[in-house]
Image (spheres, rainbow, N blue to C red):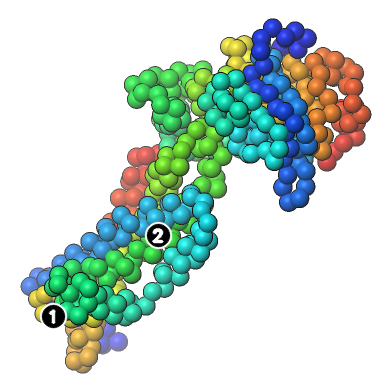
Amino acid sequence: MSDFSSALSKALYLLISGDAALMEIIALSLQVSLSAIALATLIGLPLGSVLAVARFPGRGGVITLVNALMGLPPVVVGLIVYMLLSNAGPFGVLNLLYTPTAMLIAQTILVTPIIAALARQACEDLLEEYDEQLRSLGAGTGQIIATLLWDGRTRLLTAILAGFGRAIAEVGAVMIVGGNINHVTRTMTTAIALETSKGNLALALALGVILLALAFAVNAAVMGLSGTAERAAHA
Amino acid sequence: MPDGSRRPEPDLLEVRGVTFKAGGRMLVDHIDLALRPGIVTVILGPNGAGKSLLLRLMHGLLTPASGEILMPGAGATARTRRGQAMVFQAPVLLRRSAKANIAYALKLRGVSRAERNARAITALEQAGLAHLADSPARRLSGGEQQRLALARALALEPKILFLDEPTASLDPASARAIEGVIGDTHARGVKVVLVTHDVGQAKRLAGEVVFLNRGKVTEISPAKSFFKRPESVPARQFLAGEIVE
């Protein structure tokens, strides 16, 4: 119990004192995870909505695959991205290994299936309700997709938040492709892993508390904005 | 309502030998039907007769297993729903304001932004919903939602309006309000095709009755003669309350 209270006071102290190293780690964590979420959203939402609306041979197989990819093991993704970006790999020439960009790539790969699969489900549920009416009004496939994305925005936001949760808490892939290099690729999660391995449990726990608070703050902010937008749009 | 004894203008839509099957069952069985202008056509029949299916086939939401549906100027089959609009039993309204629901439908039909707003407001006024223009559509009462769905359909200025039991889940006052709008719509020259199993409503609105039983049209008659002396046995049984499927 004393460990927890000591961790909490340490976390508070680190935050209030504006510890430069901590702020750098928080900034990098947010930068990588939010960028990965933005990219995964750009890919996942169109992919999910097209899978919900389009009918083509093998659709069931693609949906099963996207759903299965939600459970991608981060270390496996890390390993694959590592092999692709290492000097011996096809993209070695880009010199991206052990950079925030490599971490961004790994997180995007991990998060995209989550957003795509949840978006597909949300759009498909809405399509069940809207399908006949939209076709009756003369909507084409593109217009149906746009309508589902707009009218399903609250559920899609939840999908994006689920992706953010995965990205911000992820450690295996970013550790492998980022290398946990101080001032370069150290994130909250890799820092926690490092401090734990050094036996510095209080600091690790303090970082954990800050990570939780960060995730909570981002979720609360997004849900608050979503509620305001929802009321404004009369949804 | 005028009766269907005269035939001054060409048919608006023709159903030729249309069938529809699902799960190995013949749900619509070789139906021939012509929709004439200037008259309210009521498709009457017991539950499960295939009334709503026939409406969806005519509107192009379902594809017939065989036969064809012809609309002048719409090619070999009525794949295009331009010139038609449909209101469903349970109104499907988008998650936006009442006015935006109508504007959305107009946008899909290529109406300019400036015209959309004016036409949406006019449609709301005609439906008696102008005061609810900015209200969330899905928070309106059941009757208001159905009137909004009807206003949205009418804003498209259809030649044919398909109505699939639009008052089935409404209280009597709301149902009367909807029937009033249907009457006005018919008076403006829009062809109204109404599916119902409510005999009273059919009597109030029908110019002609298409009676459907077990996927087959058993009778097409002017409303007056249908309710006075139905020709087919299933229609007689239905009016006598002996078919309750």
How many residues crowd mark 2 within 10 Å: few (<14), some (14–19), many (20+)?
A: many
Q: Residue furthest bottom?
A: A199
Q: Quadrant of the C terminus of chain B?
A: top right
Task: From the top left corner, tell me how far across and down residue B121 is, in percent.
Answer: 43, 21
Of residues A221 and A108, the one nearer the viewer is: A108
Q: Which residue is mark 2?
A: A116
- Residue A161 in view, yes or no: no
Are the two marked residues, 1 and 2, in contact with CB atoms closer than 8 angstroms?
A: no
Sequence-wise first label, 1 or 2: 2
Q: How far apart in space, not on screen, are marks 1 and 2 (Cα)?
A: 32 Å
Chain under callout 1: A
- Residue B1 in view, yes or no: yes
Amino acid of disc 1: Ile
Left or right placement of residue B190 versus residue A64 in this view: right
Left or right placement of residue B182 versus residue B33 in this view: left
Q: Residue at x 23, y 81 (%)?
A: A176
Of residues B138 and B90, the one nearer the viewer is: B90
Left or right placement of residue A207 versus residue B18 in this view: left
Task: From the top left corner, tell me how far across and down residue A216 is, in percent.
Answer: 30, 65
Circle 2: element type = helix
Image-quadrant location for residue B200: top right
Circle 1: element type = loop
How many residues crowd mark 1 within 10 Å: few (<14), some (14–19), many (20+)?
A: some
Image-quadrant location for residue A203: bottom left
Chain under callout 2: A
Residue B62 against residue A104 in the figure, above or below = above
Q: Which residue is mark 1?
A: A181
Left or right placement of residue A209 versus residue B94 in this view: left
Image-quadrant location for residue A83: bottom left
Task: Tell me, yes or no, whether dots 1 and 2 are on the same chain.
Answer: yes
